[in-house]
Image: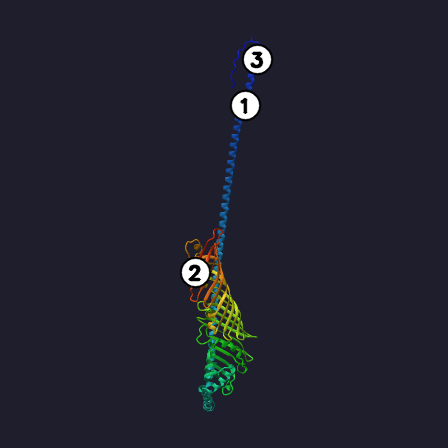
Amino acid sequence: MARPIDIELNDSTPGIGVTAERLRADVARRREQRDESASEVVRQIDEAARQKAEDKASREFAERLRLAAAEQARQLTEAAARRAAEQQAQRAAAEAARRQAAEQAQREEEEARRRAAEERTRKAAEKKARAEARERARLDEEERDRQAIRERLRQRRERRRRVIWPLVLGVVLPLALAFLFLLFYSFEGKRAEFENTAATLFGVPVNVGSARLVVLPGPQWQMHDVVVGSGADAVRIARVGIASSLPGIFGTPTLASIHLDRPQLPPAVALKLLDQVSDPMLLKAGELSVSGLEFGAGVKDLPPLTLRATFRDGRLSAISGQGEGAETGKITLNLAREDQWQLALGATQLRWLLGAEVPLGEAMVKGTLVPGALQIEEFSARLFSGELTGGGRLSWDGGWRLSARLAAKQLDGGKVAKAWVREGGVGASATLLAEAPGPKELLSRASLGGSFAIERGVLGGVDLDKVLQERGMGEESRFESLNGDFVMESRRIDFPVLNLVARDLKATGTLSIDANRAASGRVVVEARSSGARRTASLKISGSAAAPNFQR
């Protein structure tokens, strides 16, 4: 508010009228300004009131919209609930109708089955009754036939009684006497003839212990305790059976088949006989069978074999057979002559090849027999949960010799050298050479040389990382690879080169295991990190079954 101005008006003052007029104008201007300020305040108040009224109206409109939406949603929910209830009621009604229809169909089906079963029972009873009637009729007819046959037999017996005794005395009695003569007469005089024939056939002396003729079930010459040859190469046969015709009993034997029972045959002699058994007169139309064949006296590594041989133009053309034993497993053998003898041998296990501690399983050998030797074209077997394959040559002229190339893959390292390697897949390749007087000594005198590699395994008995850190010896070391060379001879194994690679270290060394299974060697371990070079040296001692590592 403007401060009042006190002005004393005196008409006697010069120019007072002008001044007064100016003052009045000034007062009027200020009054107008005051009125405009008041109007602005009123306008603002009116504007605020109008805005407040609009906000209230907006809120009331929004509330009305919310209430309307809520009411609409409630109505829609109620309508959906009514429709769901109606649909549920319809489904319930349909399900009830379906169950009723299913129950009705089941009742009808059961009734149909019952009627069908009754019908089958009735038909079966009728069929059984007809069959029983036919059976009674057949039995009655058979009984009439038997009575007729008994009557005919009675009449026939009456007729035979009048001629039986002359027939017995004139025909049957001489035949019976001849049969008894053949049954009990030893025919020892034939033994020399058989010995001479067999000696000519085989080219060596033949001795027959005893000879006799067996008439039933057919004529057969039997010779017991037969020995072919002499010394270490002698073939011993418990019994030889030669089937013959009746005319050949007293004259020249005509042979139909030959059977050998429990022969003991040295392996070298058996191989030579494949080319020597070729006499056309003796074998051209016959058949040769063998039971209980053993390769040498007292040999228990192979089961007794049962063989059957066939001949073509007087020459042995094929041999097949098998044998099986609880300890030796099953063996199958097939030999066929083409230009040369082709051999196929299969065995479930070969405990005799590498020894009872190292059995080979599922073995297979294929090869060609040449004079004095077997050319092994294919060999495979299961070994230490892996596979062993190879090929080579086995000869026996002037002593036994074996040369072979072998390869192994995926052998279980824990089984190959369980005291040294606890895990890892072993692969190897090697050459085997052996020479001995007999086949049994071949592998004990063999030399084997080659290389091996083990991937991702565990070395037992020492922790190489702890050794480098001087924290003791530890118990095992994981490695990425372990490889080297080996030479085995006279039960001694040498590893002149061994290389081991692990994540943070590498090692090189040598190892020897002598014939008494004592172990000796040395290993140098070196860290593979780029820092300071650390090395450690280990001495290996102990045995093959219990190695010992020392710094």
Mark 3 and mark 1: Cα distance apart in space? 30 Å
- SS type, badge 1: helix
In the image, what residue type sits under mark 2? Ile
Point out which mark residue 39 bears.
Answer: 1
Q: Where is mark 2, residue-wise?
A: 540
Please name whichever residue, 467 or 181, is drawn nearer the observer in this view of the structure: 467
* Circle 3 residue: 19
Give neighbour class at mark 3: few <14, some 14-19, many 20+ (Cα, 10 Å): few
Relative image position of residue 153 (x, y in whole percent)? 46, 85
Residue in front for this viewpoint, 202 or 465: 465
In the picture provided, is 476 more to the left or to the right than 336? left
Q: Earlier in the sequence, mark 2 or mark 3?
A: 3
Q: Position of residue 444 (x, y in %)?
A: 46, 70
Calculate the distance from the C-alpha at mark 2 to the C-alpha at mark 3: 135 Å
Residues tagged 1 and 2 counted as in contact (Cβ below 8 A): no
Viewer-proximal residue among 129 and 378: 378
Can residue 526 be seen by looking at this rendering?
A: yes
